[in-house]
Image (cartoon, rainbow, N blue to C red):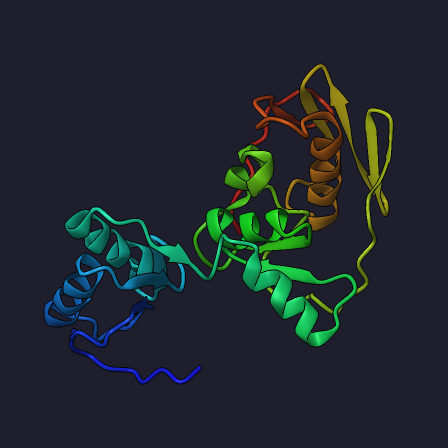
Amino acid sequence: MGLEPVDKDGADVVAVVQGWSPDLNWPLLAEGAYAIRRGAFWMATNVDATLPTERGLAPGNGSMVAALRHATGVEPAVAGKPEPGMFTVAAREVGARRPLIVGDRLDTDIEGAVRAGMDSLLVLTGVDGVEAALRAAPVRRPRFILADLSQIAAPFPLPVVDGDRARCGAVSATWQDGDIVLHGEVEDPRVLRAVLALLQVHSGDAAWTGRLLDRDGAELRPTDR
């Protein structure tokens, strides 16, 4: 595009691109603030508030973006998640007809996929878990949930919804006055697919607030692994 990256503000600086880096420091943030206040276009690569590390959740790019937003009073444009543009461009570039977006965050990965009109898979290796996914607003609700990517190439039966019941292989889930009754183990990915399919039909416009029950009526609390 004819642009040259620099690390200091000046009269010829036309844009600030802010992405995550472990070396981001106060001097760089200050240079970005000077340019933004002067009117330079500000683009953030993503606004993830946190990122998972071996020691837990650390500040992500969104936290650093928040520092400049607070310092300048300016709202950045966002190139990445949860904006749908990145997803649609990527799908077009590879010629994907039915892309599957995989991620571990509901508020960026999954929301971006939903806003782009694409199927999404939440993996439980990072930020969000099963309970959060089932309770999420429809714009952040995944189509599928897996513990990790080890079974991504395994046989993958899809749920079939018939009224208040969704079957997925040999297991099923039933909608019952706002609650969902499981006919199978809550840890079974097929059960979760059936539950998500029911939510799409019966709670497509709002977050689900019912209970998850076993066939004897006992309330279940899904784990995140």
Seen at 71% across and 14% down, the residue is 177
Seen at 24% across and 74% down, the residue is 13
Q: Which quadrant would residue 4 be assigned to in this image?
A: bottom left
Q: Which quadrant would residue 90 be assigned to in this image?
A: bottom right
Screen quadrant of the N terminus = bottom left
| Residue 150 appears in view | no
Left or right of 10 in this view: 167: right
Left or right of 45 in this view: 85: right
Total label count? Answer: 0
Is residue 140 depicted above or below 99 in this figure? above
Towards the viewer: 36 or 102: 36
Seen at 20% across and 53% down, the residue is 67
Towards the viewer: 101 or 179: 101
The percent coordinates of residue 15 (x first, y second) are 30, 69
Seen at 40% across and 60% down, the residue is 46
The percent coordinates of residue 68 (x first, y second) are 21, 55
The percent coordinates of residue 57 (x first, y second) are 31, 56
Is residue 119 depicted above or below 20 in this figure? above
Towards the viewer: 143 or 31: 31
Of all residues shown, which one is farthest toward the front?
Answer: 11
| Residue 225 appears in view | yes
Left or right of 6 in this view: 145: right
The percent coordinates of residue 167 (x first, y second) are 84, 39
Left or right of 62 in this view: 209: right
Of all residues shown, which one is farthest toward the top?
Answer: 177
Q: Which quadrant would residue 164 be assigned to in this image?
A: top right
Is residue 158 depicted above or below 101 in this figure? above
